[in-house]
Image: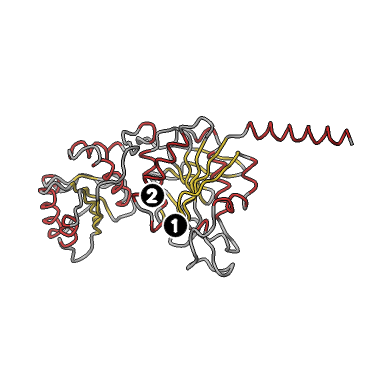
Amino acid sequence: MFKKILVSAALMAATAAFAADLPSVKILATGGTIAGTAASSTQTTGYKAGDLGIQTLIEAVPAMKDYANVSGEQVVKISSNNMDTKTLLKLAKRVNELLADPKVDAVVITHGTDTLEETAYFLNLVTKSDKPVILVGAMRPATAISADGPMNLLEAVRVASTPEAKGKGVMIVMNDEINGARDVTKTNTTNPATFKSPELGAMGYVSGNKVRFYKQSTKRHTTNSEFDVSKLETLPRVDIIYSHVDDDRVMADAAVAAGAKGIIHAGTGNGSIANPTMEGLKDAVTKGVVVVRSARVPNGATTVSLPMWTKAGFLESDTLNPQKARLLLQLALTKTQDPKEIQRMFDQY
């Protein structure tokens, strides 16, 4: 009996020592499909997103404890199509609080996929730490027969626990791929392999039981970012106008009337603008609204084009898609309304 007690004590001590050597990863839960439930195991649409709490998600993936000491915290329980500025700011402040704690080595955020790329890019601009921040979601609810959430969560924790993940900015880990927040976008409405960085490519993979990095972004982010939301309770209104055949100035005028401080124009081609819309956007600029040309085209940079657009004072979004350009413009407007300074920010971020 005495020997059994000694063996048991030795095992407990070894387990405690092993746990002490593992990094500490905090999982912040916001809801989404990864925490979704449906009426049957074959239902992969029309489910209730964000139904499960964080502890249930953690208990479903016990293998995470082989890579990190994980603990969870529920921030909100929403479907991410309902993400808003208030929640973004709350999440960003909490991430910065946690990462300022020397006992926390990384943060993983579970999130719905609808606006996952936007939250990731926002955090990429406002996180004040080089510790890993990983966002993860799922395309099938937790009750599905082929739920992708558990493996995605495991791989997110594995990446967050990897020393090489430090300093690379905010990342999304799903479907064995590691993508940087700036370049990644959702490319398919229902397929699990939806998150891609179309032209610039993934940063790495979780493959062959290893985390493999191949590149990183050259754009400013996290500890090299000038943006600070610690004292902000809201952000300036910025609207997106989507170009189309028969476009006119109605949406531009509506945005100005609604109090927009900025407008992102999702143009055709290389950020092209229909003549009637251009007149509305020109008037918006004369009223102090900052207008940025982006594109509805999924690949390529929106660059300086027709002289009349430059003369009108319109800026360019580089390779940022409209939804990410909107976030950057919101943050830029908290610091300045100078078009030259804002264009600098689009060039650098």
State the count of labels: 2
Q: Choose between 125 and 308: the one closer to the eye.
A: 125
Q: Is residue 246 above or below residue 53?
A: below
Give me the residue at 38% from left, 54% from top.
Answer: 83
Place of residue 41 in the rendered image (x, y in percent of width and height, measured from the top left): 59, 67
Q: Which of the 4 image quarters holds residue 157?
A: top right
Q: Position of residue 115 (x, y in %)?
A: 39, 54
Would you say 336 lies left or right of 19 here?
left
Q: Amino acid at mark 1?
A: Ile
Q: Regarding mark 2 in the picture, which secondary structure is present there?
A: helix
Helix, strand or loop status at disc 1: strand
Which colour scheme appears in the figure?
Answer: secondary structure
Q: Amino acid at mark 2?
A: Thr
The N terminus: image quadrant: top right
Report the quarter where the C terminus lies.
Answer: top left
In x, y percent, where is residue 158?
57, 41
Q: Answer left or right for 249 relative to 118.
A: left
Residue at image position (40%, 51%) is: 185
Q: Residue furthest right?
A: 1
The relative height of residue 93 versus residue 85 in the rendered view (above or below) is above
Expressed as whole percent of the image width and height from the top left, the position of residue 140 reads 52, 61
Residue 99, numbered label? none
Check disc 1 and report the residue beneath it.
78
Circles 2, 1 touching at the beta carbon (< 8 Å): yes
Q: Earlier in the sequence, mark 2 or mark 1?
A: 1
Q: Is residue 291 left or right of residue 100?
A: left
Residue found 25% across the figure and 55% down from its top:
240
Residue at x-position 16% and y-position 55%: 256
Left or right of residue 101: residue 293: left
How crowded is the residue under tag 2: few (<14 C-alpha within 10 Å), some, or many (20+)? some
| Residue of label 2 | 87
Q: Mark 2 to mark 1: distance in Å?
A: 10 Å
